[in-house]
Amino acid sequence: MPQTSHNRPLPYETSEEARLSDAVTRYFLHPAEDTLQALERFLAPHGASPRAAAVAIQAADAVLDAEIEQLAAIIVQQGSSLVCRAGCTGCCCHLVPCQPFEAALIGLYITARPELRAFFEAAYPEWDERTRGLRESYLAWGERYYRDGVDDGTHRLEDYYTPCLFLHDGRCRIYPVRPYPCRSCVSVAEECRAPAAPDGRPGMRSMDCGAYTTHKHSRTALTDLLWKICGPGPHAAVNRPMPDLVRCFLREGFPAVLRYASTPR
Ligand code: SF4
Ligand code: SF4
């Protein structure tokens, strides 16, 4: 469903936010040096603003959703179909990292919903206990494995397979603001839902839709720009588990999230 003022997860508070959102959309639809520079002119005056970062991510998410709909239509034309269905939550048992800017969007969404905030505060300790001692080292291993192609043997893929903190009664409690790794992931492989081997676990046969268009590349440029404006720059970014970033945002605010996501392990 296209975003409208009625279903936008984070409603605009000012006309400036609407203009910022438009600038992000323009950049994603026409990714080029001039549209990126125009976007920087919109973003820079906001400084390290969690709302500006969240509005920018929300606009990027809306473009990605529209692109995935188009990809799905092409896949259907070719005679296949997406196997993802409501209630299939296999890919919600992976460890999801996110950008601090995505954590700002999730955090603001939760802040506006006291019931969801209470759910998060109640669920975090159990998730923390369940994944403590594993999630940071697993994330570091995964980073080297996927980014550098180096398997140092400290973990195996199947070591982490436990429900996401936000998965409740088979539903994602933050679905409208879920981060890129969840949003971009869809599958056309029946095996995704019924894997025959451990490395075919649900979610492992999915495709990263953003990588099939210019979206992922443009999104990296957007987050690099946000890092440049908000913090020490993209070179310092460290992957952190999404629930930890969200908790940090809710308890200590956006500057603390930026520090946490740029502190070496
Ligand atoms: S990617 Fe796979 S596990 Fe995730 S919803 Fe789609 S079919 Fe299910
Ligand atoms: S944030 Fe939502 S979509 Fe992503 S893994 Fe958690 S429950 Fe699943």
Image (cartoon, rainbow, N blue to C red):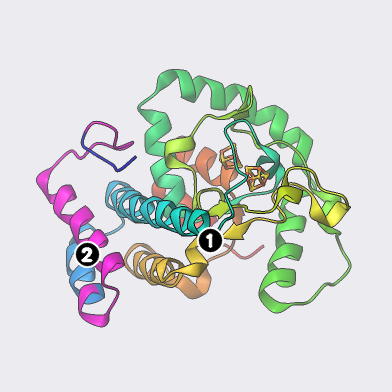
Residue 253 visible to the viewer: no
Given the image, on which type of amino acid does mark 2 rest?
Arg
Q: Residue furthest left?
A: 15
* Ligand 1 picture quarter: top right
Residue 6 visible to the viewer: yes
Given the image, on which type of amino acid does mark 1 rest?
Gln
For mark 2, give the secondary structure.
helix
In which quadrant of the rendered view does residue 233 lie?
bottom left
Query: Residue 139: x percent and y percent?
Result: 70, 58
Q: CA distance from mark 1 to mark 2?
A: 30 Å
In which quadrant of the rendered view does residue 238 lie?
bottom right
For residue 136, side relative to residue 39 (left or right): right
Instruction: Determine whether 43 is above or below 168 in the image.
Output: below
The answer to if 28 sits in the magenta stretch is yes
Start and end of the magenta stretch?
6-35
Q: Residue furthest bottom?
A: 33
Residue drawn at 43 percent across, 31 percent down: 110
As drawn, the label of residue 26 is: 2
As drawn, the label of residue 78 is: 1
Of mark 1 and mark 2, the one earlier in the sequence is 2
Image quadrant holding the C terminus, namely bottom right
Q: Main secondary structure of the magenta part?
A: helix
Query: Residue 86: x percent and y percent?
Result: 57, 32
The answer to if 221 sits in the magenta stretch is no
Query: Residue 136: x percent and y percent?
Result: 72, 54
- For label 1, the crowd category at 10 Å Cα-Cα, with few meaning under 14, some 14 to 19 and many 20 or more, is few
In front here: 59 or 191? Answer: 191
Residue drawn at 60 percent across, 43 percent down: 84
